[in-house]
Image: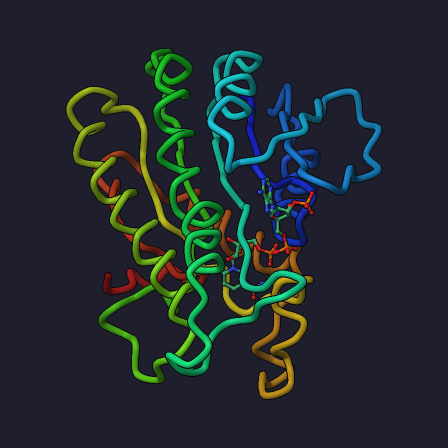
């Protein structure tokens, strides 16, 4: 089996790469980085530099992979050098909003577009993106974080819609949105202050939980939003 990890240089993405490296039935792992190339020299890994906001990069990546069984997108942004998640409308900045959409939502759809030929093998396959529970509209009790929440809600809608198309055209593929739990990475580090230590996972732990969820998925489960603990989250 072969795995493709988009964002293999991130905290959660690297833990996915390491998880698949430990599986003896995985022949090849394609993984992407954007700015930071991780130090992994295992011959089963092939690294690709990809900016997910550029469709040409995604198309070029997909042209270099073959016969993928697990395609997992772990790219995401919550803050950049200038912006953080908004506490009120006073902080809304159109550029940050559009950047959040461009990094967190659209790439999964572009990836789906260019991955279609690689799922024609008819083996059961997984197409999953790491979303976030704060993207649930139903569970939005606290407000704030407009751009991140909106981009993850958009991502969830894209995955749900894709699952309906692929139930007809690629019925072997299970489409899933995954919530990893609060995980100790660069993305979450500015927000750890109020997180109880037993609710802050190391990346390997959150990936092990998400892989347990993925391990139970079959095409009839396609188009759902899964928490790391196996709960189906409301959209
Ligand atoms: N950590 C948490 O508590 C938490 C909670 C809920 C959901 N999530 C979600 O989990 C996913 C993984 O986040 P993380 O915590 O592992 O964050 P992270 O350590 O900051 O990793 C982010 C990844 O995104 C990549 N990336 C960013 N912009 C990119 C671009 N334009 N093109 C290609 N790659 C790009 C980074 O690549 P480079 O490093 O090479 O630049 C890196 O691989 C995200 O979708 C996040 O929203 C995380």
- The residue shown at (39%, 27%) is 125
- The residue shown at (24%, 64%) is 234
Looking at the picture, how far across and down is residue 98, in whole percent?
A: 42, 53
Q: Answer above or below: position of 210 versus 111.
A: below
In the image, taking residue 31 as reference, residue 97 lies left or right, namely left
Disc count in the image? 0
Relative to the observer, which residue lies in front, 43 or 134?
A: 134
Relative to the observer, which residue lies in front, 166 or 2?
A: 166
Q: Answer above or below: position of 39 versus 63.
A: below
Quarter where residue 2 is shown: top right
For the rendered model, the colour scheme is rainbow
In the image, taking residue 122 as reference, residue 49 lies left or right, namely right
Quarter where residue 150 is shown: bottom left
Quadrant for the N terminus, please: top right
Quadrant for the C terminus, please: bottom left
Looking at the picture, how far across and down is residue 178, in whole percent?
A: 41, 53
Relative to the observer, which residue lies in front, 81 or 20?
A: 81
Looking at the picture, how far across and down is residue 26, in whole percent?
A: 61, 25
- The residue shown at (34%, 44%) is 176
- The residue shown at (20%, 40%) is 161
Q: Answer above or below: position of 212 versus 127.
A: below
């Amino acid at each position: 089996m072969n795995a493709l990890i988009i964002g293999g240089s991130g905290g959660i993405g690297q833990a996915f790469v390491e998880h698949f490296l430990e599986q003896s039935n995985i022949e090849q792992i394609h993984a992407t980085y954007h700015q930071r190339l991780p130090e992994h020299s295992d011959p089963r890994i092939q690294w690709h530099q990809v900016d997910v906001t550029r469709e040409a990069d995604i198309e070029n990546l997909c042209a270099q992979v073959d016969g993928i069984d697990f395609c997992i997108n772990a790219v995401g942004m919550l803050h950049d050098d200038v912006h953080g998640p908004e506490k009120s409308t006073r902080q809304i900045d159109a550029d940050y909003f559009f950047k959040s959409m461009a990094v967190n939502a659209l790439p999964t759809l572009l990836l789906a577009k260019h991955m279609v030929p690689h799922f024609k093998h008819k083996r059961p396959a997984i197409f999953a993106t790491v979303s976030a529970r704060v993207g649930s509209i139903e569970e939005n009790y606290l407000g704030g974080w407009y751009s991140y929440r909106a981009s993850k809600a958009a991502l969830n809608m894209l995955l749900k819609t894709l699952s309906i198309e692929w139930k007809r055209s690629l019925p072997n593929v299970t489409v899933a949105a995954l919530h990893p739990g609060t995980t100790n990475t660069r993305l979450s580090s500015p927000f750890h202050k109020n997180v109880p230590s037993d609710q802050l996972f190391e990346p390997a732990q959150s990936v092990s939980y998400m892989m347990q969820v993925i391990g139970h998925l079959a095409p009839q489960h396609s188009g759902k939003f899964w928490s790391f603990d196996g709960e189906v989250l409301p959209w």
